[in-house]
Amino acid sequence: MIAQVRPTSVSVVISTKNRPDGVMNAVRSVIDSLPEDGEIIIVDDGSIIPARTVLRALADPRLKCVENPGPHGPSAARNFGVCQASSDLILFLDDDDLMVEDYCTRVLARLPELPDACVFGFSTALHLEADGSRSYQKSVSPQGVLGPETPLKHRLAGLGMGFWIKRHAFNDAGKLDIAISVNEDTEFSIRLAANGYSCYCDQTAGVILILDPVRASGDASSITKAAGAKARYEGFEYILTKHRTFLLGHGAFRRKFFSRVLKYRVRAAESDGWYRFWTTQRPLAEAIVFGLLGSTWLWISKLKITRPFRS
């Protein structure tokens, strides 16, 4: 008889690159919260000092280090990590954050109570400040199961916010899109919503976000906090174009993203490709309004750069 490999209860996937101290602390926090039949999958995305070497001192049989053969980048590394998992429940953690000690247990205990369509979820977070204090960050999403009746903006989940998902849904939705480097979790959440899936918001913190210079720079609420203006508007345009048909039924969300495209294009003073983008959007009347408004703002932003005011 061939021995059957017993699946794990949860697979925690952590992608990492050149953050030896961060990934060590992240893994230690997961070890403290992981069930005995859980596993931690570290995906090394090309670190100078291999993660396998950094974590050698942690002799825990639940820890598995793999090297991403490529393509590289956070989304591709996470996709590879999911492929290595033996559980149908995947939980993501960033390599510079920590997991709250009871979070895995809470997620596993809740799963049997959720409807079949509820296949992913997320939590609020604690922020670890420089002085060692912690502040609680309440989510804008309401507590509980969030289905099609919930505004789309409340069903968007950051992968660093205690994000968990059933592996069959992750694969059925097409995994993370490696063509986008900003707002890839927003794009994935939209895809899950378009597939008819519901999610669960836990207003009790599941992760601890470590304060760093970028997070403290005044844009802490944004999941695209480390990206420049050009990368941001390109990400928003990509999402609006890829999900143009689905977003026709979500006007408030669509207009918000269109406004963000304008905001970051103006900030970057970049008009290349603007006409090609807005003329493909729908509904046409709305696209024309944004197109004319954006063209005016972009012309003014370029004027300020080429002809600065003199005192």
Image (cartoon, helix red, strand yellow):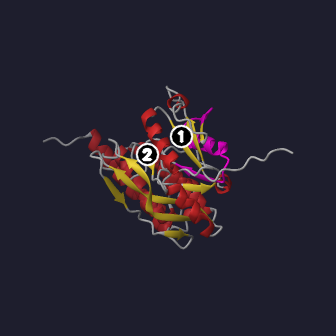
- What is the number of the mark on residue 97? 2
**Residue most toward the left?**
311
**Going by the image, does 228 lie left or right of 171?**
left
Residue 192, percent across and down? 60, 59
Tag 1 near tag 2, CB within 8 Å:
no
Segment colored magenta: 65-92
Q: Assign a secondary structure to mark 2.
A: strand
Residue 229, percent across and down? 39, 45
Would you place residue 18 above or below residue 279 in this image? above
Please tell me which residue lies in front, 122 or 175: 122
Task: Look at 39% across and 42% down and name the residue there.
Answer: 228
Dot 1 corresponds to which residue?
15
Q: Quadrant of residue 83?
A: top right
Q: Quadrant of residue 88?
A: bottom right
The quarter of the rendered structure image containing the N terminus is top right
Tag 2: amino acid: Asp
